[in-house]
Image (cartoon, coloured by chain):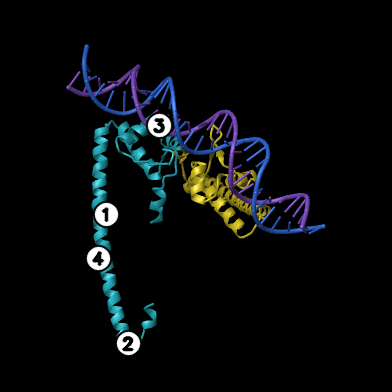
Chain colours: A cyan, B yellow, C blue, D purple
Amino acid sequence: MGSEIRRSMPVLPISIVMQLTDLTARQIRYYEEHNLIQPHRTEGNRRMFSLNDIDVLLEIKEMLERGTNMAGIKKVFERKKQLASEQQEISDRDLRRIMREEMRQARNMQKTSIRQGNFSRFNQ
Amino acid sequence: MGSEIRRSMPVLPISIVMQLTDLTARQIRYYEEHNLIQPHRTEGNRRMFSLNDIDVLLEIKEMLERGTNMAGIKKVFERKKQLASEQQEISDRDLRRIMREEMRQARNMQKTSIRQGNFSRFNQ
DNA sequence: AATCCATGTGAGGTTTCCTTACATGGTCGT
DNA sequence: ACGACCATGTAAGGAAACCTCACATGGATT
């Protein structure tokens, strides 16, 4: 929904991200360097982060604290992205199926209307 | 709940607030000057805004567009604060009533327990 | 002992934000 | 019509926050 938009809106400067995650700027930039996050950039080249970025950073932090190294973390996130895109594919298929179904119904409705009488004023 | 904390967390720099509200920095500072918002300040004196601040700014914007002037807007917000604090007072009274009630019950429980036997191991 | 990895640190430069002060175009009462 | 006020624009000068790049460091691994 719209909450997904909100969560992915780049609105947080790095200073706030540091506070919220308890990471240093160096760490945050390092993780970006390894493509674990892709913060937005302002016209003036400043990083702006989203709430989703915060989540990812907190996950990274936990994994590092558990002893996982960058390579391992990268693998985990690649796998996650893969799963997410597969899920997205399925959603796309579902969406297309639903749309086909709706169009079929709409056609039937139209036929019915024509049979039942003149409803043409509702066709715009 | 916790969402109230989140909404009142000062995490947005003025540049982002400008985008989200479509107001100029001058306008935002002017409304602060009139005490309609009280953004947090960083150690370095930079304003940081919360989502609640955004809401207030959008309300101000709407009222100004409707032709209300600062004086009128101030009155509206003062009235709002008054109502909110009255509401808070009521909540406080409720809270105290509830706590009294719970303590009364607790005392009864204790008496009952003593009468029924030795439950002292549950008292800490 | 040499290497690597994650992070610290410092320099030098740019962007963003701050305050202060003055300018400006409507609106309003007289 | 005129001066006053209100909400906002704009510019200057300075400070804070952020940028990249480069080198340093301590712990783990080989």
Residue at the disc numbered 2: A116
Under circle 1, the secondary element is helix
Instruction: Judge whether A100 appears above or below B46 on screen.
Output: below
Q: Residues within 10 Å of mark 1 (few under 14, many from 20)?
A: few
Amino acid type at mark 2: Gln
Kindly identify the amino acid type of the residue bearing the numbered disc 3.
Answer: Ala
Q: Which label belongs to residue A97?
A: 4
Q: Chain of mark 2?
A: A
Quickly name the residue at label 1. A88
Q: Name which residue type carries label 4.
A: Arg
Q: Are marks 4 and 3 on the same chain?
A: yes
Q: Which mark is residue B4?
A: none
First in sequence: mark 2 or mark 4? Answer: 4
- Residue A1 horizontal side relative to residue A104, left or right: right
For the residue pair B15 and B78, the one nearer the viewer reads as B15
The residue at 28%/82% (across/down) is: A111
Question: From what the image shows, is residue D6 above or below residue A113?
Answer: above
